[in-house]
Image (cartoon, rainbow, N blue to C red):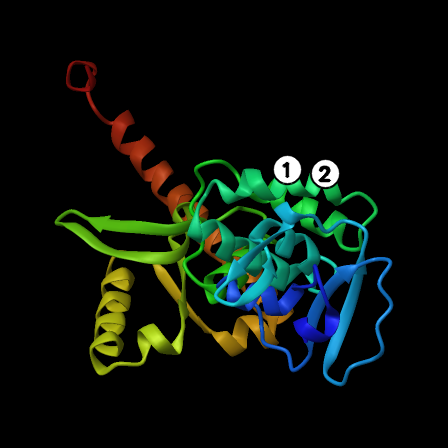
Amino acid sequence: ALLAAGKDSVLSHHNAARHLRLDVRGTSQINVSVPFERRLAPLSGVRFWRTRQLELRDWKSVGSLRVTNLARTILDLASVLNERWLGVAVDAALRQNRSHLNWIHRVFTEQGKGRRGAGTLKKILLQHEPGAAIPDNPLESIGQQLAAQMPIKPVLRYIVCDDRGFVGEVDLAWPEAKLCVELDGFKTHSSRTAFQRDRERDRQLVRMGWQSLRYTWDDVNKRPAAVAQELIDILASRLTSLKQEADSKWPQQSRTTATLSPSTAQ
């Protein structure tokens, strides 16, 4: 495809993303960006993207191939991916190096004006706070996106402890509601050891008064709206239940304090 496209052509969009180890779904179509003035005959299985903004600094060599660099690839992906998958790709870029966020910001400022998907990419970039935890994988990225719809923002990779120390690290948590979410990818949770460990930790969390919810890839990717609404309902129920429990204890504590003598209270 690059040979057919001629000089200064580069692999871009999904194909560049795959070579740069960004988490995007594969496509049967080969994407090649070429200088805007170039006219090319249609080529089966290839999409040519004519662009006015393709300089030497915008691409790199990966083996024997020329591909758009990471920041430019993210900018191109914004025009073809929905918000969910664009967020997954940005998270993958930041896992490689947190400083990529500044690089993507700079390229977006220089080349993003008027481009399709620019508003979505800007929104995603602004959501990344300096020093904030970055999702470990695409499943965690999508799960965090769903949780962002909640009235209370969750803590990513929250560490739960009891009186004896460390209990476990959960993917998403609302400590004030003692509610946590585990995102079960097949790769890391399919072994017999992992299966047993997960159940033991769930039981320990229940003993501590926590509620642990488990969601799979199909849950968050195919039924995102249902999962988001379920989380909202359960979080509200947990907060109401804990408040009622606290309120029921307060009058009892007040009566106990009132029966103490002045000297004892002092």
Which image quarter: residue 98? Answer: top left
Please state the horizontal and vertical placement of residue 239, each as a whole percent of the image. Answer: 47, 50
Above or below — where is 247 with respect to 258?
Answer: below
Looking at the rendered structure, the secondary structure element under dot 2 is helix
At horizontal 76% and vertical 49% (from top left) the residue drawn is 53
Which image quarter: residue 105? Answer: top right
- Would you name the residue on which mark 1 appears? 106
Q: Nearer the viewer, residue 248 or 10?
A: 10
Q: Which mark is residue 110?
A: 2
Q: Quadrant of the N terminus?
A: bottom right
At horizontal 73% and vertical 78% (from top left) the residue drawn is 46
Above or below — where is 174 with respect to 79?
Answer: above
Above or below — where is 153 with respect to 30?
Answer: above
Q: Is residue 105 left or right of residue 134?
A: right
For the question of whether residue 209 can be seen, the reply is no
Above or below — where is 194 with respect to 149?
Answer: below
Please state the horizontal and vertical placement of residue 246, each as a whole percent of the image. Answer: 38, 43
* Residue projecting furthest to the bottom: 44
Q: Give the amino acid at mark 2.
A: Glu
